[in-house]
Image (cartoon, rainbow, N blue to C red):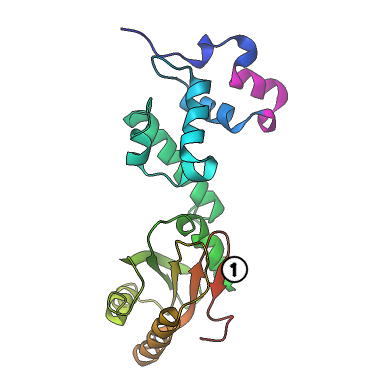
Amino acid sequence: MEEKIKLMDLPKNERPREKMLRYGADSLSNGELLAIILRTGSKSENILNLSNRILSQCGGINGLLSSNIQDLQDLKGIGEAKATQLIALSELSRRFKSFKSGEDIKIKQPKDIVDYVMEDMRYLKKEYLKLIMLNTKNVIIKSVDISVGSLNSSIVHPREVFIEAIKCSSASIIVCHNHPSGDPTPSKEDIGITSRLKECGKLIGIEVLDHIIIGNGIYVSLKEKGVL
């Protein structure tokens, strides 16, 4: 059985690890960095070629990091082991960018929530409504996805939002949803749902602090817009 082509099988001057040690990580291309992580190529393709092809077929780093495990396994030369390595890399990247490293996250302004959810939500192909629950000190207790699909009043019912908040003894909540188009401009439906949640929150005693709409690297806070 033919063995996979490893990094050590490449000519010494082409080995990314040696290049990194000699010149530093910033001297490596994205493909070379990925090659260090994956380590081995396929039976017919060395690791550098495989890594560059993966990046090309995924549409670059952003596409790679937003791919799911099935997307990755559909690529030639990527089995379960490499797919899980890449998913782990993607998750670490998201946690770093959104500060989800285990420490308490206190929300002082809309940008804090944007930093928390942006990398999770900016590339989603469907609309997700995410509920962020906070304690009395505005520290995040938990976040959950409430619905998936077009955001409308038929699927976003206050009951589904506040039952989660009550379970977690939340003092306040922030709702976020994404626009797959990349344009976070709020629709009439977005504003209507926000007003409805705000009124329900007053009755229940759980304040709705903000509704943030996520686009591709940009956002709109309905609190900043004066809707809340």
Which residue type does callout 1 highlight?
A: Lys
Q: Quadrant of the N terminus?
A: top left
Numbered-mark total: 1
Residue at screen point 46% across, 65% down: 179
Residue in the image at 43% along x and 36% along y: 86
Q: Quadrant of residue 11?
A: top right
Is 42 left or right of 48, judged from the image as shown? left
- In reply to whether residue 16 is colored magenta, the answer given is yes
Per the image, the residue denoted by label 1 is 111
Give the residue drawn at x 47%, y 54%.
Answer: 123
Magenta range is: 15-27
Q: Position of residue 134 (x, y in %)?
A: 45, 73
Residue 221, placed above or below residue 93 = below
Q: Is residue 96 magenta?
A: no
Name of the residue lying farthest toward the right: 23
Q: Secondary structure at mark 1?
A: helix
Residue 140 visible in the snapshot: yes
Task: Identify the image quadrant of residue 30.
Answer: top right
- Specify few, some or many for label 1: CA neighbours under 10 Å numbering under 14, 14-19, or 20 or more: some
In the rendered image, is residue 108 in sight?
no
Seen from the viewer's position, the closer of residues 14 and 134 is 14
Q: In front: 209, or 205? A: 209
Picture coordinates of residue 201, whole percent (x, y)? 38, 86
Residue 207, above or below 146: below
Would you place residue 160 above or below residue 39 in this image? below
- Where residue 218 appears, as percent x and y from the top left, is 58, 64
Can you give x and y, in whole percent of width and height, for residue 187 in the image?
Answer: 46, 78
Predominant SS along the magenta part: helix
